Each structure stands twice: as structure tokens, then as C-alpha cells.
Amino acid sequence: MWAQDILLTDGAVTPAAYTARIAGLLAALPLTRSATYAQLAEANTELLKNYQTVSSNLLLVNNGLLELNAGMLELETGITQLESGLEQLDSGIQMIEILVGVLDISMEAAQKTLELAQNSPVIDEEHVKELEQKVKELEEQQANYAAQLADLQKQRVEYGAQLEELYVTRTELTAQKKELEANKRVLEQAMATIDAGLLELQAGQTQADNQFAAAEAQILAGESQLNAAEQELILREEEIAQGWIDLEEGRKELEEIAAEGKTFPVECQFCDTVYEFTPEDIQKLLKNA
């Protein structure tokens, strides 16, 4: 007996508990199964348990990849929309900057014209007022364009910040996807290993069944040969006995041997087998002759 506990996959057990466990497994085998080649249920149970665990984890990983891909698709849509919005904002800013440039030129010309009109003795006061109103309108347009430009630039900064956040999120999701795909490959390899183990167990069980069937056939053939040999021996005994009875001297000799009460040996000239006849056997042969 072992002096220390035995470590199994489901924990350590004492030698006595382990012995009882193996005895229970063997006792549960049917009489038609060989204990030598029998496949213990624990092997299949452990593999199936691992198969279920790996299969569940693989299902979770696949679901995670599906959700992640859906999230990344939605993220890419948002990035595309923001990038398109930034392009439109850049186009709007560029347009307003052009308009502001044109307006600055117009404003400069209007201010020079107003200055000349104010200093000219031939231009009346009403025309000067009209020029002043024109300059005022241009100033209002400048202020309006400046406000629009500031608003567009503010939106561009906000869009740019949102886009940077989405870029960071895309990087994180890409890393998560790579990790899930790596886990998926590991789980798929584990599934393949378990499948191979199950197939190997099935092949071993089939081989054991075939070996047991072959052994059983050999036993039956041996039993048949023994039965035939026994029948042959019986026939030879009868032939030898009949040979003695057919001879008158042999019958007399048999009666004398039986009267002596001793066992009489007879050797077969064909197989060299020695047959021993008791007085009871001889009396029986004489009686049935």
C-alpha cells in the first residue's frame, strides 16, 4: 500500500479510497467486457466536461466578437460622419475666409471713398451720409462673418476632439478584437485536441471490443476442440473394451483382473495414452458386453 495520498484531477484521495474507487469501477463492468481493455467512464466524463467548458467559452468568445464587430461598424460610421462633417466645416471656413477677404477689400475702398467725399467741396452732405451708411453695413457684415467664422472654428475644434476620442476607441476595440481572436484560436485548438482524444478513446474501445471478441472466439474454438477430443477418447475407450470382450481369453482375463480388485492400466498404441480401468469399470464392461 502507498503511504501517501494519491492526487487525481478532482483532488487527493487516500490509497484506501482510491482502491475502493477502482474496485467499484471494475465491479460495474458487465461480464461480457474485458477488465483489461475496458474504457473507464472517468476518461470520457473528464473529456466531455472539458469539451463542454471549452465549447461554452468558445461560444462566449464568438458572441463577443459579433458584438465587437457590430460596435466597430457603428464606430466606423460615426468616424466617417465626423470626418465628412470636418470636411464640410473646412469648406465653410474657407468660403467665409474668402468672403471676409473680399469684404475687407470692399471695406477699404468704401472707407477711402467716404474720406474723399468728406473732404470734397463738390459732394453734398446727403451723398456723404449714403457712403457712411454703406461703410456701416460693411462693418456689420464683417462682424457677422467674423461671428460665423468663430462659430465654425469652434465646431471644428469640437469635431476634432470627438474624432480623436473615436480614434482612441477604435484602437482599443481593435486590440480587444485581436485578443478575442487569439483566444478563439486557442479554444479551437483545444476543441480539436479534445475531439482527437474522444476519437482515440472510441478507437481504443473498438479495438478492445475486437480483441475481446477474438479471445471469446478462440475460447469457443478451444472448447469445441476439447469436446471433440473427449468424444474421441470415449470412442477409443469403447473400442479397446470391445476388443477385449470379443476375445474369449480377454474376457476371462478381465474377470480375473476384476476378481483381484486392482486397477488395470492399458496403453494406447496410437496416442501412447495410458487408460486405467478400475474393477468397477471392468465389471460394468462385462455386464454391458
Image (tube, rainbow, N blue to C red):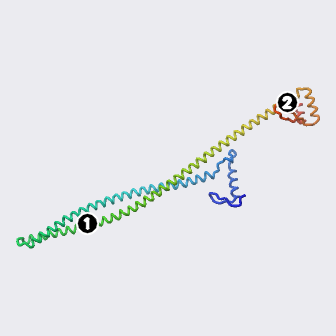
The label shown at residue 267 is none
The mark that comes first in sequence, 2 or 1, is 1
- Tally of numbered tags: 2
Residue 149: x %, y % from top left:
25, 66
Q: Residue at x 9, y 69 (%)?
A: 127
In the rendered structure, the answer to whether residue 121 lies left or right of residue 157 reads: left
Can you say which quadrant of the picture contains the N terminus?
bottom right
Residue 55: x %, y % from top left:
53, 53
In front here: 119 or 47?
119
Residue 251, quarter of picture: top right
Amino acid beneath label 1: Leu
In the rendered structure, the answer to whether residue 244 lies left or right of residue 225 reads: right
In the rendered structure, the answer to whether residue 135 lies left or right of residue 216 reads: left
| Figure check: 166 above or below 231 | below
Residue 51: x %, y % from top left:
56, 52
Q: Tag 1's secondary structure? A: helix
Q: Tag 2's secondary structure? A: helix
In front here: 115 or 258?
115
Q: Residue at x 41, y 56 (%)?
A: 70
Q: Residue at x 68, y 57 (%)?
A: 18
| Figure check: 90 above or below 273 | below
Amino acid beneath label 2: Ile
Q: Which residue is mark 2?
A: 240
In the rendered structure, are the residues bearing label 2 and label 1 in contact, judged by CB atoms less than 8 Å apart? Answer: no
Q: Residue furthest left?
A: 122
| Figure check: 155 above or below 27 | below
Residue 256, quarter of picture: top right
Q: Which residue is mark 1?
A: 149
Real-space CA distance between mark 2 and mark 1, rounded to the nearest whole angstrom = 134 Å
Can you say which quadrant of the picture contains the C terminus?
top right
Estimate how packed mark 2 is, as few (under 14), some (14 to 19) or many (20 or more) residues with alpha carbons within 10 Å.
some
